[in-house]
Image (cartoon, rainbow, N blue to C red):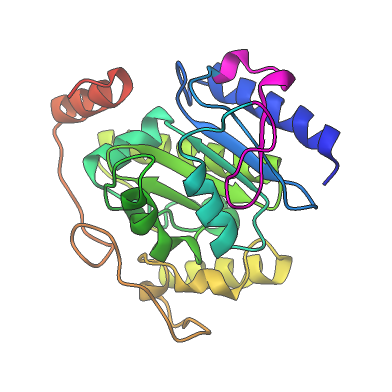
């Protein structure tokens, strides 16, 4: 990846994250891996809406600084994703309000309600809580990274990754859009999941089109549990859903849902 193009795209995505309220203040972090293995990353304690090129930190794959900027304290999370997924070249971590509402409620985004999401993103599991910038967070994420393109982190936020910066951002945006639709549908009485035969067709289409490969069949979700498709590796992780099967339901009154969203947006405990 051309370094100048990567720098330009990183800045544009930082500004978009801030403009769309996916981050506030110095929240979130973005990185991209260059062809020579160097990492361009957002610096620590810097508002993404005010990012400029001279603030970009440069590190090696072990996180050692290669310029005079100190990378985000959460860079270890990015480096873990790069190690676990050689196909990934960019990572976006943010706190989008609707997706984060799922994270603070202890819920994954794993119900097959939108065909486009099954095609391009797949399930978004919930990693157990770990203190940010520590091995606790990395350890909680590690089992989920291989077969998913985005994760929720309990009581924290969301992370998405892809082959380039725009794919990583697009996946984060899809996560947030899906979470918003899921919350609105619950206010209207609940969503209707796609039937198993429709899910199977969509999974076959996404593999034929190259959106996601067969490795994504090992997702810890309800998609494949409702179809006859099997994981090609024979390895399907245990769901991180609080019910243990990825398909549990919760019931909320309108007032409870409004209060939950208010806490997610304002950061109140």
Residue at image position (21%, 30%) is 257
Q: Which quadrant would residue 87 be assigned to in this image? A: bottom right
Q: Is residue 164 left or right of residue 18?
A: right
Residue 253 pos. (x, y %): 13, 33
Q: Which quadrant would residue 246 be assigned to in this image? A: bottom left
Q: Is residue 11 above or below residue 104?
A: above
Residue 113 pos. (x, y %): 42, 52
Total marks shown come to 0
Q: Is residue 61 left or right of residue 209?
A: left
Residue at image position (14%, 29%) is 256
**Segment colored magenta:** 48-68
Towards the viewer: 259 or 128: 128
Residue at image position (64%, 65%) is 206
Q: Which quadrant of the figure contains the C terminus?
A: top left
- Residue 115 visible, this orientation: no
Residue at image position (60%, 30%) is 42
Q: Is residue 44 above or below residue 106?
A: above
Q: Is residue 59 magenta?
A: yes
């Amino acid at each position: 990846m051309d370094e100048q193009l990567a720098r330009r795209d990183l800045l544009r995505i930082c500004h978009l994250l801030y403009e769309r309220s996916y981050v506030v203040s110095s929240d979130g972090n973005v990185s991209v891996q260059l062809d020579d293995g160097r990492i361009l990353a957002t610096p620590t304690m810097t508002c993404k809406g005010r990012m400029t090129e001279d603030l970009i930190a440069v590190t090696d794959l072990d996180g050692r600084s290669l310029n005079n900027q100190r990378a985000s304290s959460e860079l270890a999370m990015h480096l873990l994703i790069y190690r676990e997924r050689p196909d990934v070249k960019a990572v976006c971590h943010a706190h989008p309000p609707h997706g984060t509402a799922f994270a603070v409620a202890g819920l994954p985004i794993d119900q097959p309600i939108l065909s486009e999401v099954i095609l391009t993103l797949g399930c978004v599991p919930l990693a157990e809580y770990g203190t940010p910038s520590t091995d606790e967070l990395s350890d909680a994420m590690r089992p989920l990274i291989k077969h998913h393109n985005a994760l929720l982190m309990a009581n924290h936020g969301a992370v998405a990754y892809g082959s380039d910066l725009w794919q990583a951002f697009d996946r984060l945006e899809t996560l947030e859009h899906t979470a918003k639709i899921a919350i609105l549908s619950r206010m209207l009485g609940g969503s209707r999941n796609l039937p198993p035969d429709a899910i199977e067709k969509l999974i076959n289409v996404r593999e034929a089109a190259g959106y996601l490969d067969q490795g994504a069949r090992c997702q810890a979700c309800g998609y494949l549990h409702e179809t006859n498709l099997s994981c090609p590796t024979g390895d399907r992780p245990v769901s991180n859903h609080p019910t243990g099967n990825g398909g549990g339901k919760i019931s909320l009154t309108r007032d409870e849902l409004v209060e939950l969203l208010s806490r997610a947006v304002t950061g109140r405990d």
